[in-house]
Image (cartoon, grey):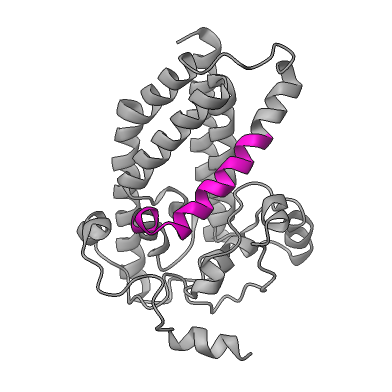
Amino acid sequence: MDADTAFVLGAKVALLGLWFLCFFVAERLLPAALKPRDGGKAAGLARLRRNGALWLLNSGLSPLVVVPLTAWAAAHSLPWRPDAWGGWSGLLADLLLLDFLIYWWHRANHEVPFLWRFHEVHHLDRFLDTTSAVRFHFGEVLLSGLARAVIILLLGFPLLSVLMFETLILMASIFHHSNLRLPKTVERALSSVIITPGIHWVHHHACRRDTDSNYGTILVLWDQLFGSRNRRERRLDMRIGVEGRGGEVTLRAALLQPFRRRLISYSGQSRAAECREDSVR
């Protein structure tokens, strides 16, 4: 690993740790929603432990599998990238293209049943805050790492561009999953360009028509271009989770969730009562 890459990797860890801590504290001082809807304080603490355990598991996998795989792909990528595609303009183009590609990867995680099995664990969270941004099944992390390696191999992204994009994507995810109360004018201004908590809250609404929308991570541009932008206004009484599913699952159940035999598919015809009521509002 060269000095520039080592510096960016170290800066990424430090910056993300500080960013997470700031939003974790801020959302408790200025919360949009006051508490999880189900179970009160005890359930809230159990949820934090569960999300923290999933994050720790993935943090262990990252240096063992994901980072080496990414570095290998960058070192063996196809040599088609022109010399002119470099410097700051090349970096900006890389970041824009990577944000475009992650939009489609996120969308695929909702539309491809096999991928949804793993991504569903993220959506089973019954409340949104900064810890939701790091709540993913290890299978999704591994699949995402593999998909990213293939893209790097084919398109020739430099490792520095990938690391900088990862930093931006995690900062954006922490922000738009946060329970921070923003002034309406600030939310409105930001939401014309980037994904905000209000936009992403709708994506986590436990009604499939809303869950299957607002796929963007940084820019709202891709949802606008490809017809997945949902104009529904966030309501703080929206039920968060997966349509047709009950309460939060245990850590063990979350880890086993993708491998269970499905009795009712995500694309089934049954609709939660709340979703039926919303459809006539």
Q: Is residue 103 above or below residue 77?
A: below
212 sits left or right of 192 in the view:
left
The one nearer the camera, 58 or 182, is 58
Say if the magenta span includes residue 254. no
Q: Is residue 211 above or below residue 65?
A: below
Say if the magenta span includes residue 99. yes
278 sits left or right of 130 in the view:
right
How many labels were placed on the picture?
0
Q: Quadrant of residue 119?
A: bottom left
Dominant SS type (magenta): helix
Tell me the residue at 53%/65% (across/down). Answer: 212
Measured as percent of width and height from the top left, residue 42 is found at 31, 69
Measured as percent of width and height from the top left, residue 264 is found at 30, 75
Tell me the residue at 68%/51% (across/down). Answer: 222
The one nearer the camera, 85 or 166, is 85
Bounds of the magenta segment = 96-117
Q: Quadrant of the N terminus?
A: top left
Measured as percent of width and height from the top left, residue 47 is found at 34, 61
